[in-house]
Image (cartoon, grey):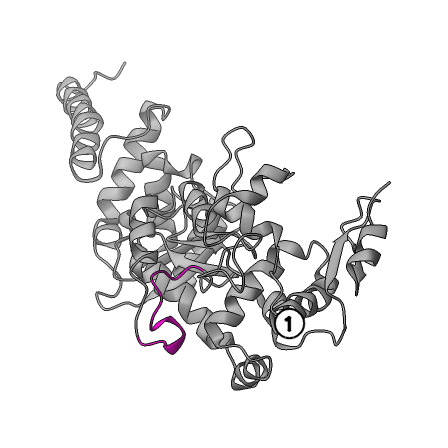
């Protein structure tokens, strides 16, 4: 029988020592550079991925292009890690897809990548990109201003918009409107010119920048043709916007806006009070019981509120717009229907449409029985 070599125990001890060193030092080195591994990895997986990361090294820690531009990168719902890594490499964001995948698994970030749209750059390291993909929150948000909103309603929407603007800062910006626009040259606020539309803003946009953009959007829509049309109605731009802000609130059905505008223009021409309910609602302000800025229904004593905005008490246009009208209301004032109507009231069927009349007697007959 052959004798075992006396060196065998030494060899076995050496192998054990090497194994221990491998099991201890490689994960320790990887943890020092790349952070702690995911808790759910087995010992074998920890050693395996730690060794891979140490092998890849600069592929993960150095940006692919220090001057890389920021570009969009999309992750589809349910997209695999392999697909994401391959797409990142193909688009030039990372050096090596396999190295990136190994880091994701080692760190546990492979389980929490979110679908969505990202802004990435090759100036970021693969590790930075891996962490960026954990939050799909866009750096931009869509901000919507609805036609007929007054500034307080716009301010109230800020808290859920994703923008970091405090209502107080917004009000301050509105009361310090941007200059350089003729239609705001004598205005105390930008109310009426905060154009209703859908906007895309940076989450970090400042209040004055937001107000400037809303007013700028109005200016872009204010064509020379529509300005001439306002002039043909005997109105300045500011007066036209003020009237349009009333029409916006009255016209439940947008197709009726030119008819409603014609009534108010007819009243202005004969020196008749506008007697517009929205101006009373504006004067009354916030209604805590209904959580609304527009009281409805109005009562007879409401029509007596002493405010320059109350067109039941004061003749002519109110001193400023009462809401921010959209293009439909602005066009209705610029191009009203040609009528001899002086009155209108809501139909009794709850449809939102109105009955129009030339005389007060006809107007009374249109009342609900």
Q: Position of residue 296 (x, y in %)?
A: 63, 39
Q: Is residue 84 magenta?
A: no
Indicate the quadrant where residue 33 lies. top left
Instruction: Identify the residue at image location x=79%, y=62%.
Output: 359
Instruction: Identify the residue at image location x=30%, y=45%.
Output: 168
Q: Position of residue 294 (x, y in %)?
A: 56, 43
Q: Is residue 45 left or right of residue 124?
A: right
Between residue 110 and residue 250, name the one nearer to us: 250
> Which quadrant holds the N terminus?
top left
Between residue 256 and residue 111, name the one nearer to us: 256
Q: Position of residue 114 (x, y in %)?
A: 45, 42
Q: Label 1, on which residue?
A: 270
Q: Which residues, given as a range, are shown in magenta?
A: 180-191
Against 351, is 216 above or below? below
Q: Residues within 10 Å of mark 1 (few under 14, many from 20)?
A: few
Q: Is residue 3 left or right of residue 325?
A: left
Between residue 217 and residue 242, name the one nearer to us: 242
Instruction: Identify the residue at image location x=37%, y=57%.
Output: 119
């Amino acid at each position: 029988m052959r004798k075992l070599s006396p060196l065998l125990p030494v060899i076995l001890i050496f192998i054990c020592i090497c194994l221990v060193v491998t099991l201890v030092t490689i994960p320790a080195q990887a943890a020092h550079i790349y952070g702690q591994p995911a808790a759910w990895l087995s010992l074998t997986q920890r050693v395996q991925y730690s060794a891979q990361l140490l092998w890849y090294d600069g592929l993960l820690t150095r940006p692919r292009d220090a001057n890389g531009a920021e570009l969009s990168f999309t992750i589809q719902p349910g997209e695999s890690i392999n697909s994401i890594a391959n797409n990142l490499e193909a688009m030039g964001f990372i050096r090596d897809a396999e190295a990136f995948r190994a880091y994701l698994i080692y760190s546990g970030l492979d389980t929490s990548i979110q679908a969505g749209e990202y802004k990435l750059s090759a100036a970021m390291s693969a590790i930075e990109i891996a962490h960026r993909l954990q939050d799909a929150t866009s750096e931009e948000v869509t901000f919507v201003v609805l036609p007929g909103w007054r500034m307080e309603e716009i301010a109230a929407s800020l808290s859920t918009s994703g923008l970091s603007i405090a209502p107080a800062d917004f009000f301050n910006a509105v009361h310090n409107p941007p200059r350089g626009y003729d239609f705001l040259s004598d205005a105390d606020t930008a109310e009426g010119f905060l154009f209703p539309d859908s906007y895309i803003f940076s989450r970090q946009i400042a209040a004055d920048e937001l107000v400037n953009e809303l007013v700028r959007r109005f200016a872009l829509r204010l064509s020379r043709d529509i300005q001439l049309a306002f002039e043909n109605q005997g109105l300045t731009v500011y007066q036209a916007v003020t009237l349009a802000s009333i029409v916006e609130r009255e016209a439940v059905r947008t197709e009726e806006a030119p008819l409603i505008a014609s009534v108010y223009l007819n009243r202005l021409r004969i020196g008749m009070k506008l007697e517009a309910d929205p101006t009373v609602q504006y004067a009354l302000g916030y209604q805590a019981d209904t959580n609304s800025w527009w009281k409805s229904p109005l009562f007879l004593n409401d029509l007596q509120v002493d405010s320059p905005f109350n067109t039941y008490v004061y003749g002519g246009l109110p001193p400023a717009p009462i809401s921010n009208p959209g293009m439909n209301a602005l066009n209705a004032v610029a191009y009203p229907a040609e009528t001899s109507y002086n009155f209108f009231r809501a139909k009794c069927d709850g449809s939102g449409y109105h009955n129009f009349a030339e005389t007060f007697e006809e107007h009374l007959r249109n009342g609900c029985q």
